[in-house]
Every structure is written in structure tokens, then in C-alpha cells.
Image (cartoon, rainbow, N blue to C red):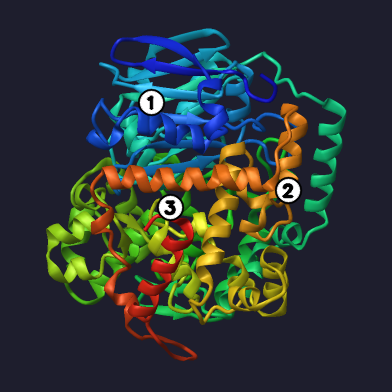
Amino acid sequence: MNAWAGKILVVDLTARKSICVPTSDYSDTWLGGKGIDLALLLAAECWQADPLSPENILVFGTGPLTGTLAPAASRVHVGARSPATELCGSSNIGGQFGPELKYAGYDHLVIKGAAAEPAVLVIDDDRVKIQPAQELWGLGVSKTEAALAERYGSDFRFFIIGPGGENRVRFAGIRSGTFNSASRTGMGAVMGSKNLKAIAVRGSKAILVARPERFYAACQRARREILESPCYQNMLNVPQMLRGSTHTGYFSYGNKESIVTPIEETISKAEDFLAAHRVGKAACFSCPLRCQDVFDVPGSGRLGMQCDPRVEFNYMAQVDDPTFAWRAYVICQETGLDTTSIANVLGFVNESLKVGDLSWKELKKDLNVSGEDRVELFLALITAISERKGIGDLLAEGVARAGKKLGPSFEQRAMHRDGLELAVPEPRTHLGLALAYSVSERGDYLSGFPIFEMVGGEAGRAMAAEAFGDGQIANNAADRKTLSDKEYVQTYMENMAATADMLGVCRWMTPTNGAPIKEDTLAELLTEAVGKTYTGEDLWAYADRCRKAFFEFDGKCRREKEKQLLPERLFHPVSSDQGQVAGIKKEELIAAISRYKKLRRVL
């Protein structure tokens, strides 16, 4: 096969055996990446399995463009039944692992069963081994990676879980390299439940493309388009980008308790931290965007970080200190925890302390922390969650389960959708986010990110006009204060995200991040790589099938009819330093969801 490696590797950890099946059994219908992963999950009937049982399978999927010269062609989709939502779990990761897996000859990796003891799965071209890893169990990610590189060689690439995954924290992720993480929906907990500490891969095979010269020319055109876009310039100055987002109340503060409008001091501190500690930019395989700022901070070494954790920890935990955000981020990376969920948990705990439902004295005693410094308390709490010690054991279940166990007052302040902690972007000021959170395939907004209204104004309307034409839909798409026509935005962004996830390229080079690479360009890249004509409409059909597979899986979990809208708090007014902000109108949101489902033909 051109573009695809041609094989799906299926490893049974219980039986200690592996087999291969042809990728072509699935690629015509599901294309690759997330699409084939969903087909594999449906075929395995994972909706019947406890998410943390051996019967749940864990799938890793590259796409036909992964490992090629296509821009940002690094991505791996990760799927399983989620221990956080108990619905279809979905995460995504870049770096170098995906290309290496294809060079070893595999498009997808399926993990079944569970090892009897801690293990490492080693894939070295056609040689597949399950080897002991008792001495690695309990180690942080960086020490594990160093030990694996020494054991197998620095030319191997690794997927690793930290103590969070080992201890089955429901929002644990999978890490790779210095800044890559498949964080959301608890895929690290699934890997930990299989006693799989790490996966090591090395490959030496080529990926064939049908028309090399034409493919290379198409790649170069796409790369130039990215480098000439405003999105690329934004990646060079994250604090300025945050300043632009904050003035419209795009970020909530605390546990969705209020809304942040410009806090110049906070952003200035972030700029000072950047100037003092940033030593460069970093990119995943074949990516011109270089979205990672690389920091060298005394005591923690070099590590890459995107903008999200800086905002999440400072705003959600209400700690106005970029050093705190950095320290919290480092702990999450070492222990393998999702930064979004952890920041949400900190907001939940912080509010519970403020209203007196949790005791500072008892919490400090539980965490063995002295003094009145919230920073040290929160950092100790993150570690306790990763180790499931004291109150950390309860919070490792996530805010939905913790709130239910602690009682009604805690339950009403648990900010989640179907068990997945909400992120910092604010749906009361940006109503497209309200729809995105409500119908998301996994409980957050990223699969349908309404960037047109985030940009707003004439610039946002011009971006929307490229997708929908110069009319009323484009006008409403850029208007953050309306739910009218947002079903079109949601469907468009979902299709774009799914297309990227199936092809194995990063969403951030597409309109989902305000970048210029659209479906027709992706279709051209796929056409030249495979040697078969694809159009943007063809990719949209694959994307629609992919989205419907999520509905099917969730329906089989028998939770679809129970799916909540959003936390009740979001339907009530909220304060900001520029006045009162109205809550989301529930009847308008329900109507928008109905229009969306009609457009998706899933009523």
C-alpha cells in the first residue's frame, strides 16, 4: 500500500502473543487514525467492558500521512472505553512515536488483556517482545525514559505512563518525549490497568508514496501557506495571544465562579517568565508551527509547554504566579496526569476551601504541609492524587465521582461533562463553546472549537466566510453572543478535526486553530501520497462516518439518553470586573443541540 504501512499489530498481553491483520481490511471505510481506531473499538465490543479491566482494549492509530513530509504529520490517536466518562475515550499525541511506528511497519497497535507483572512492549521492526519492567514501576516519566533509552538505545521512541497511570487515576495520560502527551479521557489509566509501563518502538522501513515529486511539491506549498499565516505569528508570542483572548472574557476564573477580563499584571508576569526562562521553540515531527515553548528552569531541567497549562493553573487555581503554573505542569508531566483535569480539581478544592466545606487544617494535615502557602498545598495535592494517598485517592476519581461521594454541595460545584473535567474556556461569554461542550465526542470543546467567535470582529467573520460563504452564517459564526447557526460551526470544526485525526496530521495546522490548511489541501496531499483521487467532499464523508461512530459507541454504553447538558452553574449569571454576564439560556442551548443533531442526521 502507498502511504499506509499495511499492517495492524495486535498484542495480547495476557497470552503474550501478537498477530498482524491487514490495514486494508479497514482503510477503505475508515481511512486511518481515529477512524480505524473507532472501528476496532466497535468490533471489540468495548462498551461491555469495565474501562479498567483486561477486556477493554487500548488502540493507537497513525494515519496515512503520519511519518511523511506532509506538514505536522506526527499524530497518533489513542482510544479505549474511558475510565473518566465510561464512554468512548479519545486522545491524541504528537512527537516522534507515530512516524517510528509506521517505519516499523504498523499503522495501528491494539493492546488486549493485561500483563501479569509490570511490562514493556518492545517493537523493533518485525520483532515484538513483552519484557519485564518491575524496576521501572513507580518511576516518573523522565527517569523511565532515561532507563529505557539506556536499555534499548536512544534511537527508540517511547510511550510511557507515570505513577498516575500505574495507580489508575481516571484522568491519567500517556507521555512521550519532553512535551508530548495524550492527556484527556484517562488513556494512561487504561494502560496502567494492563500493567504496561511503556511501549518502545524502532523502525527501519520506508513509507512509499505514489507520486513523490507531486507529493513533495504539495507539501512545500502547504508548508509555505502555514509559515505565511497569522497563526504562525501567534505561536511566536503566546502572552500576546492570551492578551487578545482575555479581553472578551474567554477564560473563566476559579471553578467557573467568575470571568476573567484583562489582567495585565498576570500577563506581564507571564511575559517576564518567558523572557527569563525560555530557551527556544520546539516542534513535533515535520511541523513548521513549533507550538512548544522550551523552558529551562532551575531545578526542573528543560521541558516544553504550550499555552494551555499556563492559563489553566493560574486562572482555575486562582494563583497569580507563572512559577506555580510551571511547577504544577512539571509534576503533571512527571506523574502522567492531565493538566486540564488537575487544574479543574484544584479549582474545585479551592472553592470548597473558601466556602468552608473543606478544612484548611485537615487538608494540610492530610498532605503533611505546614504554613499557609496555597502553592505548596496545591503542589502536594497533585502528587497525592498521582499516588492515590489520603484525599488524593478520592480526587483521583475526578470531580464528578468525588463530588457525588462528598455530598450535594460538592456535587453542585463539580464542573464536568459526563465525568470529564471542563477546561478554562468560558461558555457563558462565548456561546459557541456551550454547544461545543454539550455535544462533544469526549466531554470537552476541542473537537468542535468555535475559533471564529474567539477571534471575533471582522477578522473572525472573514475566517468564517471562507468556510460558509459571505452571508448570515458567517456573521453568526463570528458572534460570540449568539447560538444561531452554531450547529454549522460545530459540524464544520468536527469534520476538520476528524479529518486531521484520521490522516495523522495535527489539527493545529487547520482552521480548528485558525491555520490555513483546509480539506481540499489535505485531499491533495492524500491523493498524491496514495495515488487515488480524493476530494474535500470525500474527506468530509469519512469525517461524518467517524463522528457517527462516537454516537454509536456511546449509545451502546447506554448513557447517551442520560447525557447532561452542562453544570447548572453555567445557566446562571456570573460576575466579571466589567459587570454581570448572563448565564446560558437553557432552552436556546437545547434548541441548538437539536439543530446540530438534525444536521448530523442522528436524531
Q: From the top left corner, tell me how far across and down residue 489 is, in percent.
A: 56, 65
Q: Which corner quadrant of the image does residue 501 belong to?
A: top right
Name the mark nearer the viewer: 2 or 1: 2
Q: Give me the residue at 21% from left, 45% from top.
A: 389
- Between the residue at mark 3 and the residue at mark 1, the CA separation in whole angstroms equals 20 Å
What residue is disc 3 on?
Answer: 339
- Give the label on residue 582, or none: none
Q: Indicate left or right for 450 with 317 as reference.
A: right
Q: Give me the residue at 51% from left, 77% from top.
A: 484
Q: From the top left corner, tell me how far across and down residue 78 is, in percent.
A: 46, 36
What residue is disc 2 on?
Answer: 520
Q: From the top left corner, tell me how far across and down residue 84 is, in percent.
A: 30, 47
Q: Which amino acid does label 3 sit on?
A: Thr
User: Is tag 3's residue or tag 1's residue first in the polypeptide sequence?
Assistant: 1
Out of 146 and 117, give the one closest to the viewer. Answer: 117
Q: Would you say residue 447 is visible in this rendering?
A: yes
Q: Give me the residue at 60% from left, 52% from top.
A: 496
Do the numbered discs 2 and 3 sit on residues whose CB atoms are within 8 Å?
Answer: no
With respect to residue 19, does 177 lie above or below?
below
- Between the residue at mark 2 and the residue at mark 3, the CA separation in whole angstroms equals 34 Å
With respect to residue 600, does 573 lie above or below?
below
What residue is disc 1 on?
Answer: 197
Q: Which corner quadrant of the image does residue 194 belong to?
A: top left
- Between the residue at mark 2 and the residue at mark 1, the CA separation in whole angstroms equals 40 Å
Do the numbered discs 2 and 1 sit on residues whose CB atoms are within 8 Å?
Answer: no
Q: From the top left corner, tell me how far across and down residue 102 is, in percent.
A: 61, 22
Out of 418 and 230, give the one closest to the viewer. Answer: 418
